[in-house]
Image (cartoon, rainbow, N blue to C red):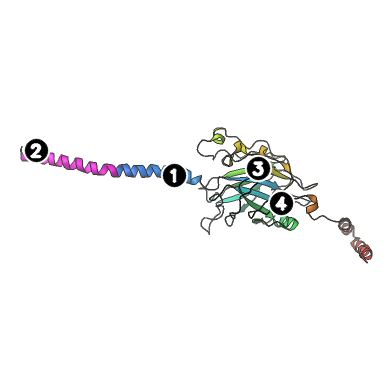
Amino acid sequence: MSPGAQGLRSRERSSTSQAERSAPRAVLGLGLALSMLLLLPVSARATNHLTRIEQLLVGANGDNDIQFLEMKFDGSGQNRWGPQPPPGPSRALLTFHDASGTQTGSFEFASNPPMGPSDPANTGNSVLIATQAFVDATGLAADFVLPSALMSPESGMVCFEQNPLDPFFPVNECLAYGSYTGGQESDAVDCPFGNQCCLTPTLNGPPAPGLSSSGAPQSLNRFQDLFGDFECGQENSNFQLEVPSPRNSSGATVQMQPENLPALSDWGLLLMVAVLLGTGGWVLRMRRAQLR
């Protein structure tokens, strides 16, 4: 064999050997890239999507400042609602809408909710978001205190959703009630893995019944699940008017029966009317005389 032919065969063997050594690295790199692509949607859906609205009250005892929202999440890793890591925007927030659908307020979570005991009656970990007026009226501690009464009385919509400033963990749970006429939100668009709720996506449907602060206290309580699955979110039809029984993260609860709420006495009502008429001093003198 000529020296030229031997050199050519040597170069061919070298090229083949180099290609064989490079192939495993290329396959490994491709495998890692595919793994990352597969893991991205799973990671994005691994936090906060197993979360839902449980109860909603927008007023009681004639006072629209007495408000609460009970949320539930399904186990560890579903309560990453606050900044991750702080400081920064919260991962989740609440938005509040009036009867026309106009957003009237929002509430960002300054921290993650506590991981308390699961509800033995209805599964899931409770989180109570309420006004100070609710806490004062019931004595039940709230996990988060709203700065004011942000929920629209009678008709409106409340949503638990991802913060646009931290959109990596998509979630969108909304409850519309009363004579709500605004745009509806879909709970099924973010359902992963092609389960039943994803195969039959629906909007939230007609609003749930309206809420009033007058008469016996009533809240919108979840009485059934959409497809029986935490994963599937909810429809407005999953809620009905019942006696409020809010529960906080520690498992404490209260039945908001009329007799459990402070009410104005007859003298208190008379005094209010008298003050408006400018005769409050006379009513107070009569009351003092009666108590002697």
Horizontal and vertical percent for residue 207? 69, 38
Q: CA distance from mark 4 to mark 2?
A: 90 Å
Q: CA distance from mark 3 to mark 4?
A: 15 Å
Relative placement, left or right, of 192 versus 97 is left
Which amino acid is tagged 4? Gln
Which amino acid is tagged 3? Leu
Q: Residue at x 75, y 56 (%)?
A: 137
Relative placement, left or right, of 50 versus 179 is left
Sequence-earlier tag: 3 or 4? 4
Kindly identify which numbered label has been placed on residue 39: 1
Q: CA distance from mark 4 to mark 1?
A: 40 Å
- Helix, strand or loop for disc 2: helix
Which residues, given as a range, are shown in magenta?
1-24
Sequence-earlier tag: 4 or 1? 1
Q: CA distance from mark 2 to mark 1?
A: 51 Å
Sequence-earlier tag: 2 or 3? 2
Horizontal and vertical percent for residue 78? 55, 49
Horizontal and vertical percent for residue 282? 93, 63
The residue that label 4 is drawn on is 67
Which amino acid is tagged 2? Ala
Which amino acid is tagged 1? Leu
Q: Which numbered mark, 1 or 3, is in the foreground of this view?
A: 1
